[in-house]
Amino acid sequence: MPAFILRAEHHARINDCLWKDGIRLDPEVEKEFTNRVEVSINAFIKERHDSEIPYREAHRALRDLWLISIEDDPPVGQIRARIAALPKIGVDLLNMRASQVIPEIVETENDGFLSWAKDADPETLVQMIRVISADGAKRVSRSRGRGKRSRARLEPLVFGQARGASAGAVKGGRPRHHPRDDLVMYLAIDWSIATGAKPLPGRSDQGGFGDLVHSVFQWLHEPAPDQALRRYWEAVKTQRAPIWRPSRKTISTLLHHL
């Protein structure tokens, strides 16, 4: 499966998208942004290729990994074992997000995050898993009938879905999902990291971020970028697909432990 490489014309188009929103990046930041976009495109290509992998299995594995990472005394041995046993799409997600937090982790290891995690400092590993295995978390309670609800529990948002939540809950069968939706999310993450601001909502190519999504879909011969944008912004609005972006404090803390 050949990798997608951004050429000079692609770089120019990405800059046009930024300029459309009045954004001018320093050359180094601009280069990092285009590199991230290329990584996101190739993550999508791999995800599309492996689309038969059951997302429910990956969701469950990442959810369980996040839950044990927030315990008072996280079992580091179990965390390492669960990382090693993750479905491929789960590994790809951790690889991509680890590269966005601390690029050196993936760049210096032959197998990326998976290899790094085998011998990583326990405290750093636990903190990293808390940051990259979920999109955040929300409190979820279930109906017990007659207007009563069970005590709320904290559930991670994985692939924009929290188990037991009324919106975006993981129900029987395969969650409704398409790699194109993830591609929009990946690009939103890239945009936020590079510009320091969330992309502006919109389905058309009139805005900078919308133009970026439309351009990438065109390069990949993918249909309906406007519909993928619509689904993404609806998910963001209902908090089912928050823009994943680690805080500077989180990154500083992780760097301190490396």
Image: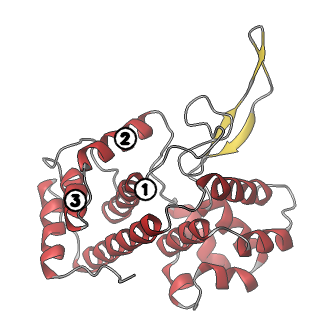
Q: Quadrant of the N terminus?
A: bottom left
Residue where numbered disc 2 is placed:
231
Provide residue 147's location: percent of width, then percent of height.
Answer: 74, 10
Q: Residues within 10 Å of mark 3 (few under 14, many from 20)?
A: many
The CA distance from mark 3 to mark 1 is: 15 Å
> Given this view, does label 3 or label 2 mark the residue nearer the observer?
2
Q: Looking at the picture, which amino acid does disc 2 mark? A: Arg
Q: Looking at the picture, which amino acid does disc 1 mark? A: Asp
Sooner in the amino-acid sequence: mark 3 or mark 2: 3
Residue 51 as seen in the image, left or right of residue 253: left
Q: Residues within 10 Å of mark 1 (few under 14, many from 20)?
A: many
Query: Which is more toward the observer, 85 or 117?
Result: 85
Residue where numbered disc 3 is placed:
212
Instruction: Identify which residue is drawn at 74% across, 83% down.
Output: 118
The CA distance from mark 3 to mark 2 is: 16 Å
Sooner in the amino-acid sequence: mark 1 or mark 2: 1
Q: How is the image coloured?
A: secondary structure
Q: Secondary structure at mark 2?
A: helix
Q: Secondary structure at mark 1?
A: helix
Instruction: Identify which residue is drawn at 21% across, 67% down.
Output: 219
User: What numbered label is drawn on residue 182?
Assistant: 1
Instruction: Identify which residue is drawn at 76% across, 68% down.
Output: 82
- Residue 169 location, quadrant: top right
Residue 63 as seen in the image, left or right of residue 34: right
Provide residue 227's location: percent of width, then percent of height.
Answer: 29, 42
The reply to whether residue 258 is visible in this rendering is no
Q: Is residue 150 above or below residue 85?
A: above
The CA distance from mark 1 to mark 2 is: 11 Å
* Pointer 3 with pointer 1, Cβ within 8 A: no
